Every structure is written in structure tokens, then in C-alpha cells.
Image (cartoon, helix red, strand yellow):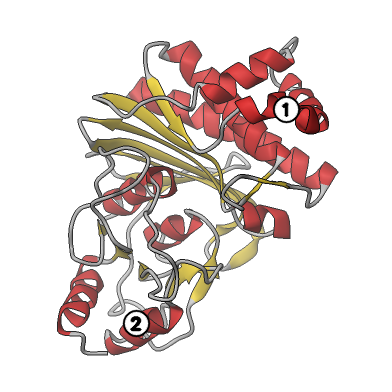
Amino acid sequence: MPYEHEKQVAVEAALCAAKLCEQVRQEMGPEAVEKKDGTPVTVADFGSQALICRIIADAFPGDQVVGEEEGTPLRQPKMGLTLEKVSAYVQRTVLGATKEDVISWINRGNGEVGSRYWVIDPIDGTKGFLRGDHYAVAVALIEQGEVKLGILACPSIPNITGEDAGGRGVLFAAVRGRGAHMFPMNGAPESSLRVASLDQNPELPFVESFESSHCDRAQQQAVAKVVGIQVPSLRVDGQVKYGMVARGEAVVYLRFPSADSPPYLEKIWDHAAGAIVVEEAGGRVTDMQGRPLDFSQGPDMVGNQGIIAGNPSIHEKVLEVLRLKSY
């Protein structure tokens, strides 16, 4: 089947990276350094990207990888202890890996957008990771500007929607034209995914970002109420939001930029994998103007503003409310 090998490689990469992330979280606790843009980065971010890039490079040495992190800053003297820790965690998976190996693998994620490239976010939702809450390891493959497959490893969410009894840890997987599936990370059988509707369950919420920066919660909540969503939102970190929509836990994901914040461009690694998971589960994903998400222009999604991802009927209602400003 098309992209079967790529899917297997992406699943392996995401699971290996998620395992490292959980080891770091359990053993190190909430420890991070600040990047140039003021956002946090952890030992797990670096280690996760190193493992993902190494696994992809071994399988597809000619492919470009576009990821969030850079390895070169780890060469700075002040980052020496961080590099030691990153290398130690990577060595649990790759025996004999040197510090230079680790930096080199991380830097493989600084590739170029082209005709075929991988997009990765080693930890999408670093603040959630640090809080002990939700995050995702995201891996996507893009060809000619179209996402062909997406994998989300989400170690913190319940295997069964709304229940903790079945354990935690879910992997979402989608291949273009082949549907979306959910695999409990404890090895339980997979299940196919389908977005839900308010007709099926009028008590479904919408999902929005946990962090209020770069999004307009008041506008999101006002629009949600107009389209018939009557319950409080779920606030979740990272692309876990896409997974929740795909498995029917929320009816739509809304992300509207805040007028009070500086202009913000979405990053391709924050949406590529999640978008195809929702689409292959029968959902629709666009920006606030109804434009398809454009992953072909580089790391910044320069042609898009905001995100609407969910059930097609509620998606269309949201677009109409935004067009008419009837909220």
C-alpha cells in the first residue's frame, strides 16, 4: 500500500521519541531552558528530535526534515550540562551515540521545504509537558505541498475517551485516502476514527489552546455559542486537540489570533500531522477564511490566519458566523 513503509518509520520514530520524553518527565521533572524567542525547551525536546531525525535519516537518507529545534546551541559552554543529559537519554536507545552524533541528528531537522519533506515537532505542547499535562510528538510527511501521512503520539491522554480505566497513551495515525486510526500505546487493538456531530451528542464541547497567548478566547467562545455549542470548552496543549476532535471527544478545534497580541504566524510543525488526522477522520480543516492550510511556503504558514478543524457541518457554520460577524 502507498506510504506503508513511511508510516511504519514514522510510528517507530514517534513511539521512540515519546518513550524518551516520558523517561525525562518522570526522572527530571519540570526543567527547561529559554530559547531566543522566549519559549521553553527541555532535554526531552532535544532528545526527541535527535531520535526522530536519526530514524528518518536511516530509512530515507535523501529526505529533508523540517523540525522545531536546533542542535547548534548545545555547543555553547553554558549548555554543556544540558547536552550531557540529552546525550545520556539518547544513548538509552542508541548505544554509543556521541554528543556530536546527537547534535548532528538534531540539526538534520533544519532542512528545507521542497517537493518531499518531513515535518516534526519533538514535543508539541512543551508547557503542558512541563506541567505534567498533555503534549504530542508529531511527525508528518509532505509531498508537493500536501500532507500524505501524520502521526501523533500522545502519552498523557486516556486510551478510552473520557475514561482513565483503560490506561493512558494513544497514537493517532492517518494516511491520505486510507482513513485515520487510534492505537493505544499499551498494545491494545487499533480502532478507526470518525469526527462526531452535535446531532449525535449535543453536549460535545469545542477544544482550544490551554495557553491564552496568540488566541482570542472571548471570540472563540462567542462563535462556539452561536453555532450551538453550549458546554464549556476543553483547554488542551499541542496537537492533542486534533486527536480529540478526530475521535469525537470535541466537535471542533478553534484557534483565532488575538488582536491584542503581535501578529503571529502559525508554524507548519504545529499543525501538519494533526490536520491530516482530522481530515482522514471525516473532518474539515482550514484557516478562518476557509482557505486550506498551506504547508509549502516554509516553516511559517504565511498564507493562513487561525485554525478551524472539525465536523464539516459545524465547520461551515463557524465560517459563516465569522463571515457575517454574527457573534
Q: Nearer the viewer, mark 2 or mark 1?
A: 1
- On the image, the x and y values in percent for residue 64 come to 38, 21
Q: Nearer the viewer, residue 220 or 140?
A: 220
What amino acid type is highlighted by mark number 1? Answer: Gln
Quadrant position of residue 227:
bottom left
Residue 275 in sight: yes
Q: Residue at x 73, y 17 (%)?
A: 99
Quarter of the image with the C terminus is: bottom left
Quadrant position of residue 221:
bottom left
Mark 2 touches mark 1? (CB < 8 Å):
no
Q: Residue at x 31, y 76 (%)?
A: 200
What amino acid type is highlighted by mark number 2? Answer: Ala
Q: Nearer the viewer, residue 246 or 315?
A: 315
Instruction: Give the left or right position of residue 176, taking residue 211 as reference.
Output: left
Q: Residue at x 43, y 65 (%)?
A: 262
- On the image, the x and y values in percent for residue 274 come to 39, 49
- On the image, the x and y values in percent for residue 32 come to 74, 47
Q: Reading the chain from its start, which is encountered first: label 2 or label 1?
A: 1
Instruction: Give the left or right position of residue 242, taking residue 45 as reference.
Output: left
Dot 2 lies on which element? helix
Q: Nearer the viewer, residue 236 or 127?
A: 127
Quarter of the image with the N terminus is: top left
Dot 1 lies on which element? loop
Image vertical order of residue 99 relative to residue 283, above or below = above
Residue 224 badge: 2
Residue 2 in sight: no
Residue on which disc 1 sits: 76
Quadrant position of residue 260:
bottom left
Image vertical order of residue 183 relative to residue 15, above or below = below
- On the image, the x and y values in percent for residue 276 come to 31, 46
